[in-house]
Image: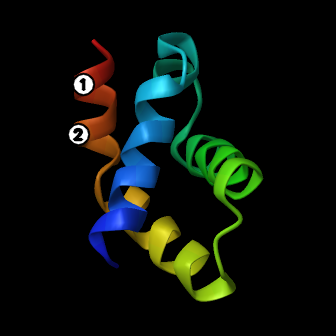
Amino acid sequence: MNSITLRKLWSVVEETQTPILLGLNDTDLIQQLLHQIQHKYRLSKEEMQAARHYLGDRLSLIRDMAH
């Protein structure tokens, strides 16, 4: 995943309200973030797949940052 896509992902994470980041289960949170990313940036199928894996691997960090 390139740095531009990473910036887009983290931008969406930072814009997402704390109750969503902390309140949804892992699967629903990833789906919510991917939906927001796709709506805002229109990533390719390959980029979305990479984003899904990236977010899944960093859910703990995302939730820690929301506190």
Residue furthest bottom as drawn = 46
- Position of 34 compared to 7: left or right? right
Q: Amino acid at mark 1?
A: Met
Q: Position of residue 28 (x, y in %)?
A: 65, 43
Quarter of the image with the N terminus in it:
bottom left
Callout 2: 10 Å neighbours few (<14), some, many (20+)? few
Q: Quadrant of residue 60?
A: top left
Q: Residue at x 65, y 57 (%)?
A: 41
Q: Is residue 22 above or below residue 51?
A: above
Q: Residue at x 23, y 26 (%)?
A: 64
- Position of 39 compared to 64: left or right? right
Q: Position of residue 49 (x, y in %)?
A: 56, 79
Quarter of the image with the C terminus in it:
top left
Q: Is residue 64 above or below residue 11?
A: above
Q: Quadrant of residue 29?
A: top right
Mark 1 — residue?
A: 65
Callout 1: 10 Å neighbours few (<14), some, many (20+)? few
Identify the element where label 2 is drawn: helix
Q: Amino acid at mark 2?
A: Leu
Mark 2 — residue?
A: 61
Q: Residue at x 70, y 58 (%)?
A: 38
Q: Is residue 24 above or below residue 57?
A: above
Instruction: State the CA–CA distance, disc 2 to disc 1.
Output: 6 Å
Identify the element where label 1 is drawn: helix
